[in-house]
Amino acid sequence: MKTRDKILLSSLELFNERGERNVTTNHIAAHLAISPGNLYYHFRNKSDIIYEIFLEYEKLVDFYLDIPEDRAMTLDDMTFYLESVFDGLWSYRFFHRDLEYLLDSDQRLRQDYRDFTNRCLASISRIFEKLAEAGIIEPQEEDLRSAMSLNVWLVITNWMAFLKTAHAAEASACLTLTELKQGIYQVLTLEIPYLTPAYRERVMALREKYRPSLHELGDTGTGVYK
Amino acid sequence: MKTRDKILLSSLELFNERGERNVTTNHIAAHLAISPGNLYYHFRNKSDIIYEIFLEYEKLVDFYLDIPEDRAMTLDDMTFYLESVFDGLWSYRFFHRDLEYLLDSDQRLRQDYRDFTNRCLASISRIFEKLAEAGIIEPQEEDLRSAMSLNVWLVITNWMAFLKTAHAAEASACLTLTELKQGIYQVLTLEIPYLTPAYRERVMALREKYRPSLHELGDTGTGVYK
DNA sequence: GTATTATTAGAGTATATACTCTAGTGAGTC
DNA sequence: GACTCACTAGAGTATATACTCTAATAATAC
């Protein structure tokens, strides 16, 4: 594997593990047992590394959220979208954590991320539209669909942060993909009122599969309050 | 005004303006035209300053979210809660921005914030309960109410971050309280399906008041996608 | 082989950051 | 007038951080 790719891989790994703020270029170089000079031969600066990682992330999500327009949408499709998006979120989880700072330090990234967000929102909205066409949810006005899509986006992109802050111990390490996917339970909660009678039970059963267990969330109190 | 209080005030101001990560203790001291030594006479370290600011924030929100149990809830109450919570969010907006890092660097804060979150979630859930008692929304099972409360929390606490990242320019400064309160539009979107026929129109009219105008959101594309 | 280019090591640098230390000052107390 | 004590200034420090520079080595092209 090329040094350049190794740098990207290690950076992502360290960023995810410790947070971008806590990982310096020297850490990355040390982790790979290469010199800082070597790292700076391949990348102009830390921002460049982050930007390239973002491009990978963007590509992955764009790939996942590609909506086939030649056929109707199924419940399996919806499950796939949800699972995939949370997979992506997990693989690049450092990104949303320090998002604001990252965008402030790189204008390219700011612009690209803005476009990325809008594409994602459009995809979510389109998914709702196709779910309605398939008779899974009731059709909605465009206004409402837009606002709902935005809420879905907010829940998805911030579920991870919620989990991290709700955990009592520092325990950043002990967060699992399984817990993350309980975010799907929250997303499906948003859909409940719009489900058609024909699909209601099936979707509710699907949702149940992602319900957070008290045991897993431990002493965070989630599900216990009032 | 006492130096100690001036430090807290200036810190909050600078943190909100530039982000905690970009504000050093030396900046704070310089901004107040006092010496770093003076600052460190009043606070053991930067974390201590942040912790005290959090305590203020906590107090404020707890005050806002105190639910009167001796009478029914009105639509005005709900409006007040929403307005107040977003006011609080605005005044201490630096906090949610760097939350994860802050919690990682201060165990006291982590524990307190966890409790704070659970209190807020309980309050939101209780508000839903009382809205149902007042005939404003349909009553819901506790499970659903909990999940909905969590979604409301996710939308509220992350609306600010969304706005900041959706804006094209760096423009961190040009974010306004008015824009922030468009988050209320998003929160009310969550309630729509549960509104009773008696209140539906009134709540929808209220929601309309917070609708983001295309002009204000400018070129973010929000509301335009698909 | 020789020339060129890509890659790497590793010491080094300018700056920043959180924080410390010493030496006070000024207002009140007895 | 001596003493205390809350408060303040300002120089200083240890460490970290992002990044640079020079020189050397490996790979490739001709």
Image (cartoon, coloured by chain):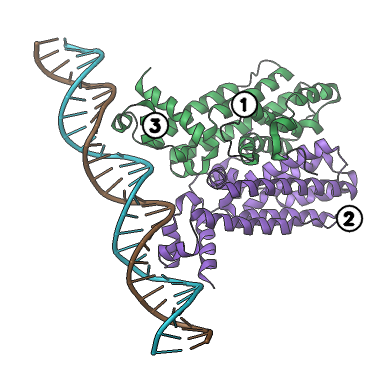
Chain colours: A green, B purple, C brown, D cyan
Q: Is residue A74 visible?
A: no
In this rendering, which labeled residue sits more in front, label 2 or label 1?
A: 1
The amino acid type, in three-letter code, at marker 1 is Leu
The disc, 3 or 1, on the residue closer to the chain's N-terminal end is: 3
Instruction: Relative to B77, say whether B165 is above or below.
Output: above
Estimate the spatial distance between the alpha carbons at disc 3 and disc 1, rounded to whole Å: 24 Å
Q: SS of the residue at dot 3? A: helix
Q: SS of the residue at dot 2? A: loop
User: Foreground residue, D12 or A116?
Assistant: D12
Q: Chain of mark 1?
A: A
Q: Which mark is residue B72?
A: 2
Which residue, given by chain and number where applicable, does mark 1 sit on?
Answer: A177
Residue sitting at x 53%, y 44%? B101
Residue sitting at x 81%, y 21%? A202
The amino acid type, in three-letter code, at marker 2 is Ala
Which residue, given by chain and number where applicable, does mark 3 sit on?
Answer: A28
Q: Position of residue A84 (x, y in %)?
A: 62, 23
Estimate the spatial distance between the alpha carbons at disc 2 and disc 1, rounded to whole Å: 42 Å
The amino acid type, in three-letter code, at marker 3 is Ile
